Amino acid sequence: MFKRSYALLALLVIAGMALAACGPAASAFECTDALGCVDIGPTDPIHLAYAMVINGPDATLGIDSRTGVEVAIALKGKVLGHDVQLTGEDDGCSAEGGQAAGTKLAADPSIVAVFGTSCSSAARVAVPLLSQAGFSIISASNTAPDLTRAGDPNQHPGYLRTAHNDEVQGAAAAKFAFEKLGVKKAATIHDGSLYAQSLQEVFATSFKEMGGEITTQEAVDPNATDFKSVLTSIAAGAPEFIYHPIFVQAGSLIIDQAKQVPGLENVALMGADGMFSPDVVEGAGDAVEGVYVSSPDLAAFSADYETTFLPKYKELSGEETPVSIFHAHAFDAANMVFAAIEKVAVQDADGTLHIPRQALRDALYATKDFKGLTGNLTCTPTGDCADPKIAVYQFHAGAFPPERIWP
């Protein structure tokens, strides 16, 4: 009797297995995303890339941001069980560099998202290429207003930034000059770049709205080495203050040469975040003493900046202090991408990962109250995600970073 029962049980088990074998197999993943999907094998890494300036006079800007992304990768570890691979191209902080970097990165369909560019001039030509390729692009340091202005031809789908909009920085710089320093007459200098031209224009508009006078708005060649003629022309207007939000090489020379031009010996000079670099201290020498620079307010960052981020930054970079100002913005950008991937990716039983490109973009644009190092980040429909807080710092000869003095 018991033998029959066991035999019957065995037959039922075998029959069940047969039915299971003949039943419907698990359906294979089918990508229905409008921009397609990135398929990542069970043991393959998630491929992220950067387009940043990592050579030349402005290299500290890109290297600093790249380290911020590397810190995020190191602290995060795996994403959905996959390692993260970071590769990149030099954007040269120029339109030409942006064209080259954008062209090369856009041709690699394994890339999920791109961090960059470093400079707004590079973004103008790189972002259209990366956007058309279906990538999500998130910059830690592009600040030109038109890149996220609704309806502007330079605003492209898939582009976001954790950096502030220069409509914020330019107005803060003007407020510092007019209210804190009591300046009533100012001049500006730009180098023709999208970043500098936009920023000085915001400064000039804000300064005039407060009751100040703009004596002149001059343009210079960023590759020039002698700026005394334009500085002499500026001196003729007798400004009390010169705002020159340009980059390291020309900015350093202008600081040095302004002290040698009659009428400008005691005029206050102020740069912006593109000059927040130890290379300015070295390039301008003793003339850098007392020069102001507007940049993100490090004092407003979360407590994790000091306790968690900076120790890992020092470990990975070998630097005692960060070499520029947008490392934390890059860290936040990377963590936003990780969170968006975790939200939209589809994972097979064997670990294969499918990341839908449009869904990834949508998840990034939907970011709200994201707890970052730089603040609580919420993205607008055109990609402004920053929680912007601007401070003014003052350089001292032979020292970096500069001293925070306002607000």
Image (cartoon, helix red, strand yellow):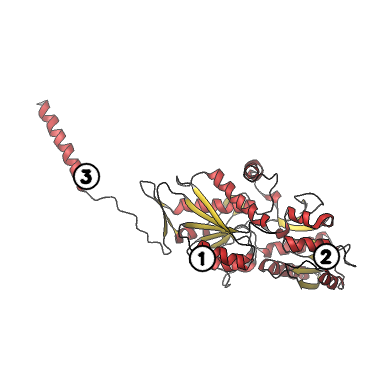
The amino acid type found where label 1 is placed reads Ser
Q: Residues within 10 Å of mark 2 (few under 14, many from 20)?
A: many
Task: Tell me the CA gap for discs 2 and 3.
Answer: 81 Å
For residue 374, say whether it is visible: no
Q: Nearer the viewer, mark 2 or mark 1?
A: 1
> x%, y% of residue 198?
69, 69
Q: Which residue is mark 2?
A: 241
Q: Residues within 10 Å of mark 1 (few under 14, many from 20)?
A: some
Q: Nearer the viewer, mark 1 or mark 3?
A: 1
> x%, y% of residue 282?
78, 54
Q: Earlier in the sequence, mark 1 or mark 3?
A: 3
* Res. 272 image quadrant: bottom right
> x%, y% of residue 143?
65, 63
> Does 349 appear above or below 290?
above
For residue 159, say whether it is visible: yes
Q: Quadrant of the N terminus?
A: top left
Task: Tell me the CA gap for discs 1 and 3.
Answer: 46 Å
Task: Tell me the CA gap for discs 2 and 1.
Answer: 40 Å
The amino acid type found where label 2 is placed reads Phe
Q: Which mark is residue 131?
A: 1
Mark 2: which secondary structure? strand
Q: Which residue is mark 3?
A: 20
Mark 1: which secondary structure? helix
Q: Quadrant of the C terminus?
A: bottom right
Mark 3: which secondary structure? helix
The amino acid type found where label 3 is placed reads Ala
**At 65% across and 60% down in the image, what residue appears?**
164
In the visual, does 243 lie left or right of 152? right
**At 10% across and 29% down in the image, what residue appears?**
4
> x%, y% of residue 367?
53, 56
Which residue is farthest right? 262
